[in-house]
Amino acid sequence: MLTKTNARNRIMEAAQTVFAERGYHDAAMDEIVRGADVSKGGLYFHFPSKEKLFFAVMDHLGARLVERIRSAIAKESDPVARLEIALETVLTTLGKRRRLAKLLLVQGYSMGNAFEKKRVAIYSQFASLIKDNLDLAVKDGAAAPMNTEVVSHLWVGAVNETLIRWLYTGAPAPVAEALPEIKRLLLRGIGAEPKGLEWRKAP
Amino acid sequence: MLTKTNARNRIMEAAQTVFAERGYHDAAMDEIVRGADVSKGGLYFHFPSKEKLFFAVMDHLGARLVERIRSAIAKESDPVARLEIALETVLTTLGKRRRLAKLLLVQGYSMGNAFEKKRVAIYSQFASLIKDNLDLAVKDGAAAPMNTEVVSHLWVGAVNETLIRWLYTGAPAPVAEALPEIKRLLLRGIGAEPKGLEWRKAP
DNA sequence: TGGCGCATACCGACTGGTCGGTCGGTTATG
DNA sequence: CATAACCGACCGACCAGTCGGTATGCGCCA
């Protein structure tokens, strides 16, 4: 069972690269075949269709990122601190890996309407991770009461847009440079005043 | 010059529909041809390529939405009020037109990497509209000092994600239901305390 | 031990269908 | 009668997926 594993992995890796560079539609199976050093038949032995292969790659990478976040926030118990760490982890991790970021955030759309479900599934993972900690923060009285369902998606959207802007324009470089501002907006937004922000002019 | 205009418009309209439903890639020129009741040659007389046609549609719709926002906020002079109105306008306008929303927010990506520039161009318009008013709010002392460049994109991202979630899952229904929460997060986030939010537990 | 059967893993030429774009021609208009 | 506007059959490139094959290894029985 060594050969099998090797070929599968080679395929996944090559697929990752090609999908990230070209996007789902413009990625040709033949190119993945070349990159993985397998035959067309070999590839189709392991994955029944282009779509399934793409989903396998997305699931794999999505799960890895979620796992990374989970283990990063596990060190903290304060929900607000956890939220900060989650933001940091996403920004720095994806900020270091353009290819991965592009694949995860953008390239799937070119699949067409079949992508909807997968997109929802992946983004929900991140949103609910945020939501859980927002709920805790609210319960603790560390954050204002709010609709955490909606707010968690606002957080995800804010980070998402920051990363996409960076992917497309290169600014801010590095992306993580935007972190303080992101934290400020989002934390203050939920009523969890970050320290050292007494700015309002005296009357 | 009446026929020309008519055909052009029919093409643009049909293209809008087809692109919105199928996405850039899965939209077939022949289908647009059918929908516009022109011939293939007629279409290519007015638009030199699929890409150009798509961009024309995007530009048209993007400009219309921007215009709508501009005229909506023109009635107000207070920058914070303007920001609120901008949020409202986008949410309610796109919330009423799934098709338009899908086209503007999602369907372009299937074009592949050529879409990057257009996406940047369109989103920048919205971001800079926000940015201008954030700058004013800061100058007025109505908002905390901040990197308005970054923050404006966070705003855009938050709204964007809310709309995409709605497009893909149907929640919240209607989208505009999320407005109060969005305003609360974003306004409080920039230090422009909305009224009636004294929530923090007394010590 | 060696030969047989069978499954897993892999190969790559080929096919079937799609679709953007073209081009030689026709009609309307001023 | 010149030019703009329009027609639609056709072309060629592309590509996911197929299919008839080969190679390898493993269990099993004589």
Image (tube, coloured by chain):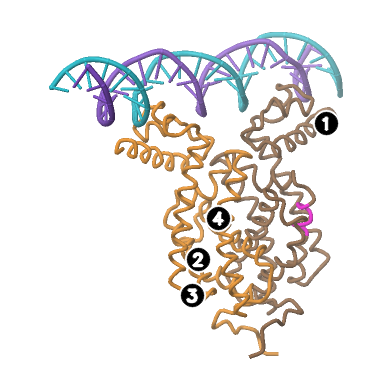
Chain colours: A orange, B brown, C cyan, D purple
Dot in front, 1 or 3: 3
In space, the residues marked 2 and 4 are separated at their CA atoms by 20 Å
Q: Which mark is residue A165?
A: 4
Query: Residue tagged by mark 2?
Result: A86
Q: Please give the residue where the numbered disc 3 appears in the rendered image.
A: A77
**Badge nearest the viewer, 1 or 2:** 2
Mark 4 or 3, which is nearer the eye? 3
Q: The N terminus of chain A is located in which quarter?
A: top left
Give the letter of the chain under mark 1.
Answer: B
Marks 1 and 2 on same chain: no
Q: Secondary structure at mark 4?
A: helix
Task: Tell which circle, 3 or 2, labels the residue nearer the N-terminal end.
Answer: 3
- Residue at the spot x=70%, y=71% of the render? B184
The image quarter in which residue A152 lies? bottom right
User: Quick check: B163 left or right of A19?
Assistant: right
Alpha carbons under labels 1 and 4: distance apart: 38 Å
Q: Secondary structure at mark 3?
A: loop
Chain at tag 4? A
Label drawn at residue B6: 1
Q: Chain of mark 2?
A: A
Q: Which residues are magenta?
A: B89-95
